[in-house]
Image (cartoon, rainbow, N blue to C red):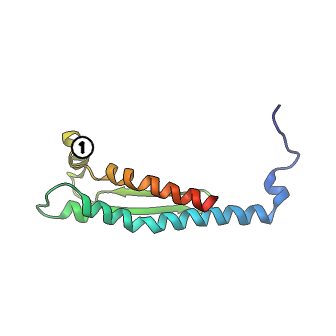
Amino acid sequence: MPVTFERAPEEVLGDFYDAYVNEVDNAVYQIFMKYEKQVENFATANAPWHDITGNARQGLYANVDHAPRQYVSMIAGHGPVEYAIWLEIANAGRWAILLPTISYFEPRILADVRKALS
């Protein structure tokens, strides 16, 4: 039998609910900000290709996007070099750096989020 409430939890808990949601949102945002530069540095240092101009390596970036109480996300990508997509997908991903970077950091970020929420 489903549980039904006469009033929504946020109505009953009021300011406590708002404070909790704000605290969780801020904690997750701070964790993502902690990793932003680390992700960028890791990708730059570990990109497996040989530089000719250095433009592709210099264009690697990570940015955190945050809409309070809605979402926190991190985007990692290549800068403006037109051949960046081929570094990621050509030769079965032999020169890829974005997915390996995400694979390296994802469990660390999630562990920190779990710890912050416990």
Q: Measured along the vertical axis of the image, is residue 26 above or below residue 11?
A: below
In the image: residue 58, left or right of residue 19: left
Tell me where residue 94 sits by quadrant.
top left
In the image: residue 81, left or right of residue 103: left
Q: Amino acid at mark 1?
A: Gly
Residue 51: percent from the left, percent from the top?
Answer: 14, 61
Residue 75: percent from the left, percent from the top?
Answer: 41, 57
In the image: residue 51, left or right of residue 44: left
Tell me where residue 77 sits by quadrant.
bottom left
Please give the name of the residue rendered at 48% of the width and 58% of the height, measured from the top-left corner. 109
Residue 65: percent from the left, percent from the top?
Answer: 48, 61
Quadrant of the frame with the C terminus: bottom right
Tell me where residue 81 sits by quadrant.
bottom left
Please give the name of the residue rendered at 60% of the width and 62% of the height, measured from the top-left corner. 116
Please give the name of the residue rendered at 83% of the width and 56% of the height, measured from the top-left corner. 11
Q: Residue furthest left?
A: 52
Residue 62: percent from the left, percent from the top?
Answer: 38, 62
The answer to which of 16 and 105 lies nearer the viewer is: 105
Q: Residues within 10 Å of mark 1 (few under 14, many from 20)?
A: some
Assign a secondary structure to mark 1: helix
Give the number of marks: 1
The residue carrying mark 1 is 93
Q: Residue furthest right?
A: 6
Please give the name of the residue rendered at 21% of the width and 49% of the height, measured from the top-left corner. 95
Quadrant of the frame with the N terminus: top right
